[in-house]
Amino acid sequence: MNISNKIILITGASRGIGRALVEEALKRGAKKVYAGTRRTFTHPDPRVVPLMLDVTDPEQIREAVSEVTSLDILINNAGIAYYDDLSDRSMIDKHLAVNLFGTYALSRAFLPALIRSHGAIVNNLSVVALASLPPIASYSISKAAAFSLTQSLRAFLAGQGVRVHAVLTGPTDTDMTKGFDIPKSAPQVIAQGVFDGVEKGVDDIFPDPMSGSVEESWVGSVMKQMERQNASLVAAQSN
């Protein structure tokens, strides 16, 4: 998958990693970049097409599908993260609504276009999908669920020519991590790592130094081997 001349939709595109992904896609020669945001967004490059797109709003998703008639890469980047201690069930629901069900809704909505283009779905997750970070417990839960969704979509869509990538980011210098006094990667580093992984066809993308430190152990792990074995059941059923 070469980014040059591709049509890309990025959710949560107005700031942070999303904005960096827009800029990196343009640098790599994308033909058109749809920038999905919940607020007014403008960009000087005519290849960028702003979309009002709240991933929890079915009507806005339908309108986006009607506008984006051709698509090569869907990047599910929109997400929320709040501190919580699991004492309030509504916090779990709030995170799942965006980070899990928003990702699911966009993936299903744009799947016909991606099947036609033999395209790719890229889900921006986090290393907390592998090991929970208790101060952001509901966020961790939602990202673990989204990672499981990503693995299942990968198995189901492989036979239809659609690749599904998980992006397992480490701490990134965005508004979401203002409260954490820890080393962080710049959003631009994440964006470069994401597109490098997509172009190489990597299933699970570890785009920064922190996440990269666990990449080798994950790729060679028993759990990754189990994922491949479980995915083979889908292929066997379709034959």
Image (cartoon, helix red, strand yellow):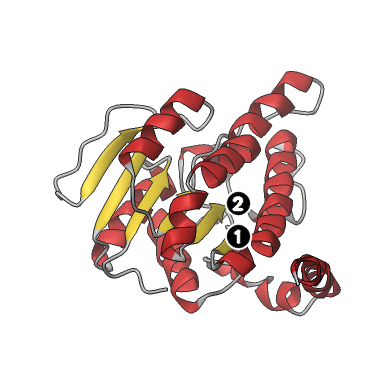
Q: Is residue 5 visible?
A: yes
Amino acid at the residue labelled 1? Ala
Q: Assign a secondary structure to mark 2.
A: loop
Amino acid at the residue labelled 2? Leu
Q: Residue 125 — which label?
A: 2
Toward the viewer: 167 or 157?
157
Q: Quadrant of the N terminus?
A: bottom left
> Residue 106: percent from the left, percent from the top?
52, 41
Q: Is label 2 or label 1 in front? A: 1
Toward the viewer: 107 or 160?
160
The residue wearing badge 1 is 166
Tags 2 and 1 in contact by the CB under 8 Å rule?
A: yes
User: Which quarter of the picture shows residue 183?
Assistant: bottom right
Toward the viewer: 11 or 105?
105
Work out whether 117 lies above or below 35.
below
Q: Assign a secondary structure to mark 1.
A: strand
> Residue 92: percent from the left, percent from the top?
73, 28
